[in-house]
Image (tube, rainbow, N blue to C red):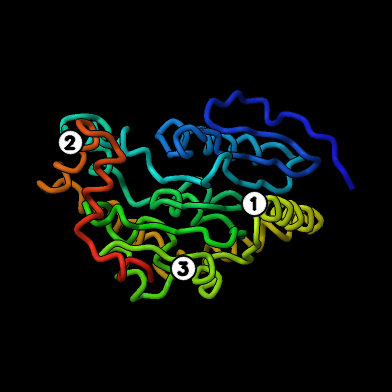
Amino acid sequence: MTEAVSTSPPGTYEFLAVQRRGPVLDVRLSRPEARNALTFALGAEWDAVLDEAESDDGVRVVTLTGEGPVFSAGHDLKEVAGGYANRDSAHGTAWERQRPSLPRSWYFPKPIVAGVHGYVGPAANHLLAPCDFVIAVTGTRFSFEQTRMGGGGAGGTVIAFQVPMRALKKLYMLGGWFDADTALEWQYVQRVVPSVEEMRAEVARWADDLAKVPEAQIASAKEGIRRIYELMGLLNVAGVGNKVSGHGSTRDKSFFEMVQEKGLREALRQRDSAFDTNISKI
């Protein structure tokens, strides 16, 4: 059945495209000119969308996809560069002031169905981690290569509970990536489909089915699952990510200075040129 599409919720968003389709709120990352790189402002908008969706009794499900050729390149390294190249800046020391916490989306009581394609950078994997279901397009690359030049600890999100231990070591100690088929083997994603169009259709099908389940059942199930993982130590895992950071080394600072001076593409080329491509893929 085709539902009428309307803009919702009432908030105005610069970096997200938000549409209401019956009981489903469809959200797209909308910075295709920057490969949907995640900024602090975009993250704040995502949290605001979830706040409004939680308060709207008519919204039963939220979906998350990306516009353009990739889901998201990860954190906007141009924005990050200023903070880490200059340790006196506000963003450069923000992680040092954090307390153990989990993302707003972890506590969202309604289901979130994500669809990804092309490329999912490190911060984009953290964005996906609290989502309830993920549909991927064949060939999607889930990357943690940024850890080659510093980054957070292996905590911080539920990713530590979502991939095998030796895969986690590979991603955070050496940097690397895995593809959609490997993600499916780990149940990191629930489905792999051949095209972006089929991914969007599959996301819609999952959302439509979830909207048919009693809302109280969904909320109860999510709360119970949250408590199980929190009792298993998830909040402490988040604290590891907050308090142990690989950022701040001389090499790390040099990389971000290169981003500023030579541009992101050249900085990434030089970062990756020294590593053996044959062992990058898990």
The residue type indicated by label 3 comes to Gln
| Left or right of 40 in this view: 17 | right
Residue at the image point whose x is 73% and y is 47% from the top: 60
Choose the circle earlier in sequence order: 3 or 1. Answer: 3
Residue at the image point whose x is 61% and y is 53% from the top: 115
Could you tell me if residue 206 is visible in this image? Answer: yes
How far apart are the alpha carbons under marks 3 and 2?
33 Å
Q: Nearer the viewer, residue 177 or 109?
A: 177
Could you tell me if residue 92 is visible in this image? Answer: no
The residue type indicated by label 1 comes to Val
Residue at the image point whose x is 53% and y is 65% from the top: 180
SS class of the residue under badge 2? helix
Residue at the image point whose x is 44% and y is 59% from the top: 142
How far apart are the alpha carbons under marks 3 and 1?
24 Å
Give the farthest residue toward the right.
1
* Label 3 vs label 1, nearer the camera: 1
Badge 1 is on which residue? 196
- The location of residue 12, given as percent across then percent down, is 60, 23
- The location of residue 252, given as percent across then percent down, is 17, 47
Badge 2 is on which residue? 257
| Left or right of 132 in this view: 241 | left
Badge 3 is on which residue? 162
* Label 3 vs label 2, nearer the camera: 2
How far apart are the alpha carbons under marks 2 and 1?
36 Å
Establish if 263 lies above or below 268.
above
Counting labels gives: 3
The picture quadrant where one finds residue 218 is bottom right
- The reply to whether dot 3 and dot 1 touch (C-beta < 8 Å) is no
- The location of residue 46, given as percent across then percent down, is 53, 38
SS class of the residue under badge 3? loop
The residue type indicated by label 2 comes to Glu
- The location of residue 116, given as percent across then percent down, is 56, 53
